[in-house]
């Protein structure tokens, strides 16, 4: 008989996971507010956990904030993989992922501001959205779908800059129709990449799958995620004493 204690999380494991999750959510809330220098005590109070428990999970505020950002990027990336998995045309995959990402800024403005208040995380991170965009553009190049793309690195500069600028624009213009705006930008990008105008208009305005809050789809999405470049896990170097209480 298998040892269930090795495969089934026990009460202590669940408590540790809840504590870590509460700290990450609190950090994300502060990042969204642009409060990157908030004291650790204030973070633990917002998370409703003890100060000692913080150091059982993170060595510093910076390590927590890095983990909070990685959590957002990984959830968004897994969600996009799930929603684009039925598509075969890499040009369509890129376009749909870009359009869905644009819509998330209105669906979850706090999550959006976590990204925007973390510098160029949306455009330059090795996790989440950027490596997936790079993967999809590279696939479209190999398939001859983006004939005008000559330098993948420079194209990522264009895509990343456009994504960040678009997010700021949508926040600054709340009365603007986000779907129409995002789809027009997507069409323009496709045309820049060499997709014929009529086809770019078609791809940029096709029906999209239902988009819900990323946190509700993460478990399903991770099962269907396509490979992306891996980033080395951050070291922990911590114990779990306070979480035993």
Image: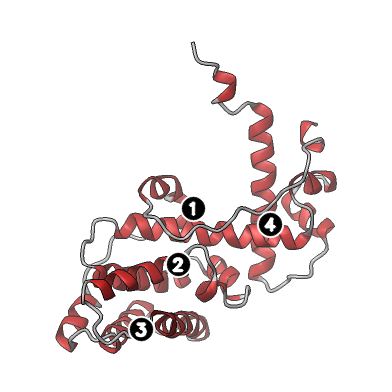
User: Which residue shows up at 49% across the image and 53% down it?
Assistant: 215
Look at the picture and state if 162 lies above or below 32: below
Alpha carbon separation for disc pair 4 and 3: 31 Å
Disc nearest the viewer among 2 and 1? 2
Which callout, 1 or 4, points at the residue further toward the start of the chain? 4
Which callout, 3 or 2, points at the residue further toward the start of the chain? 2
Q: Secondary structure at mark 3?
A: helix
Q: Which residue is mark 1?
A: 215
Mark sitting on residue 26: 4
For label 2, count other residues whose C-alpha is less than 10 Å away and answer few (under 14), some (14-19) or many (20+): many
User: Which residue shows up at 59% across the image and 28% down it?
Assistant: 9
Mark sitting on residue 198: none
Q: Secondary structure at mark 2?
A: helix
Q: Which residue is mark 2?
A: 131
Look at the picture and state if 67 lies above or below 243: below
**In the depicted view, which residue is nearer to us: 190 or 49?**
190
Mark sitting on residue 181: 3
For label 1, count other residues whose C-alpha is less than 10 Å away and answer few (under 14), some (14-19) or many (20+): few
Disc nearest the viewer among 4 and 2? 2
Alpha carbon separation for disc pair 4 and 2: 26 Å
Which callout, 4 or 2, points at the residue further toward the start of the chain? 4
User: Which residue shows up at 79% across the image and 53% down it?
Assistant: 59
Q: Position of residue 134 (x, y in %)?
A: 40, 71
């Amino acid at each position: 008989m298998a040892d269930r204690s090795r495969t089934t999380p026990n009460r202590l494991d669940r408590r540790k996971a809840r504590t870590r999750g509460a700290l990450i959510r609190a950090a994300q809330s502060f990042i969204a507010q642009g409060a990157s220098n908030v004291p650790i005590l204030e973070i633990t109070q917002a998370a409703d956990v003890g100060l000692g428990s913080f150091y059982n999970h993170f060595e510093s505020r910076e390590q927590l904030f890095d983990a909070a950002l990685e959590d957002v990027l990984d959830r968004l990336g897994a969600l996009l993989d799930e929603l684009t998995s039925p598509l075969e045309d890499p040009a369509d995959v890129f376009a749909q992922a870009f359009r869905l990402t644009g819509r998330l800024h209105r669906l979850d403005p706090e999550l959006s501001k976590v990204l925007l208040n973390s510098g160029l995380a949306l455009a330059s991170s090795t996790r989440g959205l950027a490596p997936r965009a790079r993967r999809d553009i590279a696939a479209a190049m190999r398939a001859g779908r983006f004939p005008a793309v000559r330098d993948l690195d420079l194209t990522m500069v264009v895509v990343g800059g456009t994504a960040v600028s678009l997010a700021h624009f949508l926040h600054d213009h709340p009365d603007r129709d986000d779907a129409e705006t995002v789809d027009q930008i997507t069409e323009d990008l496709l045309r820049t990449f060499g997709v014929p105008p009529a086809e770019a208009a078609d791809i940029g305005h096709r029906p999209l799958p239902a988009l819900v809050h990323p946190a509700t789809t993460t478990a399903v999405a991770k099962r269907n995620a396509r490979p992306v470049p891996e980033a080395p896990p951050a070291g922990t170097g911590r114990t779990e004493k306070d979480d035993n209480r």
